[in-house]
Image (spheres, grey):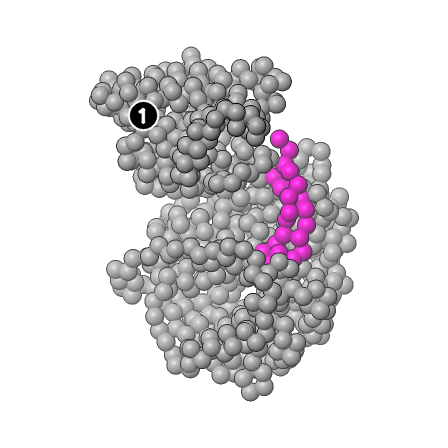
Amino acid sequence: MGPVVEEVAGWGRHPVGRGRVERPEHLALPADGEPLVPRGLGRAYGDAALPARPGGLVLESTRADRIRSFEPATGRLHCEAGLSLAEILRVFVPRGWFPPVTPGTKFVTVGACVACDVHGKNHHRDGSFGNFVDRVTLRTADGRLVECGPDRERELFLATLGGMGLTGLIVDVTLRLRRVQSPWIVLETQGMASLDAMLEGLRLSATHWPYTVGWIDCLARGRDLGRGILMRGRHATQVEAGTRRARRAMPLRVPFDAPEWLLNPLFMRWFNRAYAWSHGTALRRRVVSYDAFFYPLDAVERWNRLYGRRGFLQYQCVLPRAAGPRPVATLLERLAVAGAASFLAVIKDCGPASDAYLSFPMEGTTLALDLPNRGAVTEALVHDLNASVIEHGGRVYLAKDAVTRGEDFARMMPRLPEWRAVRERWDPARRFRSAQSVRLFGDPA
Amino acid sequence: MVGATRGMGRALARRLAERGDALFLLGRDEAELDLSARDLEARGAPLPVGQARLDLGEPAGFAAALDAADGALSRIDALVVTGGLFARQDELAADPARLTALLQANFTGTVLLCQQAAERLAARGGGLICAFGSVAGDRARRSNYLYGASKAGLAVFLDGLDLAYRERGVRVLCVKPGFVRTAMTAGLPVPPFAGEPEAVARRVLAAMDAGGHEVYAPGVWRFVMLLIRALPRAVLRRVQF
């Protein structure tokens, strides 16, 4: 019963490839040495988990999801790579443990969290996911099981964090969960009238709040540029949580591809304005569920269908603090002029970069936004934005990327040669390759 | 539990573990049993989750396996059998050895094991036996009748076992999964109403607690099969069912 060839796409549904997707309960390499791309829950937006060539092998980890051990005294969790954050939350939040770092969706596997070295609303304080990883077991290209970590095979470890699964098949991971007193989040929100106010708000909140993020109306221009809502949160204490009980939310689902005219510029402009107005500039404080705070979009299954059949590109970049606020404003202006962005952009200040060679976050400001796919125009816009990011010493996030050119990525990542050298040592034949690695690193297709 | 390491059995075992049920795992592969035992312990099953070797193809070992479970749990009150074999019709038709193994595990082995367990449970006042049949056993299909026959036979057995032992306190639940996306069904064309193992597990757990003798999972398959069973034979022939 060989796997059938099926359509394979990232969360942005562009580009769309075809592959033979295997979902084994044991992560193993094919005996014949065929190249493969590892895949988790498919939440990378672009082509990171697409096969290098049509019909190529895709190894999905989601059924390799057993917990190997958990230490209740320390929160150390050893699990197979396909375990999702959603499952970790379901099992461990009632016992007072929380993922140390979480991206904006809980439908990601632990293996992918390592491979993308994901970051979250606490990056300014805690750094990225890799900071909480003690051990990664890889099935390397030569078929061996290799353990790596901060104190063992360190170069392989640093190449694997953020290495997009290209250094070996991530089989299991040991990470440290965080103790929390309740499943609830104390949330403060405040309307911000401009980009400067937003950046200042993020900066001031960073010292006292573990979680901060801003949503900005990226269609606003001129005086209003960067207008949006600042959010900051922390885990509620038992007293603050009181006797609240979580409501079981009815899962919503986008039932079919929306027509492309739905998210037209006029509609989106008014939506964004309404969103900003509805909040006002007052400071509001309330207690919300962790789902509402961390994963608002997870409440709508398959929300990616809202962008229609052609899908969308998500653009996320980080601009170094040293470059000042100007480049952020320039980027937003460019987007506003192009009228290409949609709904809301997410803005967040990042703390110091990690030692991992290809880890995305760096000290500075990151912006993330959706660009409905309109073909060549949208790609051209990304290259244009990339040029500006390169000029100021920033970079883009591979978990989101679908179109960046290899030479541009090399300009963004000063440590790329080191990563390439480690990869060359562990996988000279490029057994692990993806559509993205073909595009960015010139891997054979 | 027999079959707790994989697919629907894995999902069901996790639900049982999360509510604190004490578990003992039976199966062919000790390394697999070990991995699943640790998983279930981490998810809340009382320590330790024990294990013993049991092969549905080797009935000679059943008594020892049940003894081991009885010993470890001090007294078992339920047997859950989700384990079984599956292969495509053409593979089974072409390979008598494979067909024999499938019939042996899905029917003969499961029947012998459940019969033994029912007697044990009855002798001590009662309990629950839950085993997995299949909608494939509800009506023959030309594309799946060998596997279907093994599950049809099992369903009749479970039905009778429930009738025979209910007054001695043993309840028997026959689970009939529809098409469920697991490693077992990988590569097969996915029909409408396909289910996920987690949803099946939730439904089965509710049925284990509720007290019926049969449950379809996902639930919609009950109506699908009602319809399919009602179809005249001439129609089945015509539509190449």
Q: Which residue is drawn at 25% across and 22% down?
A: B166
Q: In this view, does A348 lie to the left or right of A95?
A: right
Image height of B135 relative to A311, above or below: above
Residue at the disc numbered 1: B172
Q: At x 37% / y 61%, what residue is drawn?
A: A289
Kindly identify the residue that appears in the image at 47 percent across and 58 percent down.
A300
**Residue A186 place in picture, x, y as percent:** 36, 67
Say if the magenta span includes residue A19.
yes
Q: Quadrant of residue B68?
A: top left
Residue A334 shows in the view: yes
Can residue A321 be spotted in the picture? no
Percent position of residue A40, x then y? 57, 48
Q: Where is residue A107 in the image (x, y as percent from the top left)?
A: 50, 53
Q: Residue lying farthest bottom?
A: A223
Quadrant hosting residue A24: top right
The outermost residue toward the top is B60
Q: What stretch is highlighted in magenta?
A: A1-22
Q: Quadrant of the C terminus of chain B?
A: top right
Quarter holding the N terminus of chain B?
top left
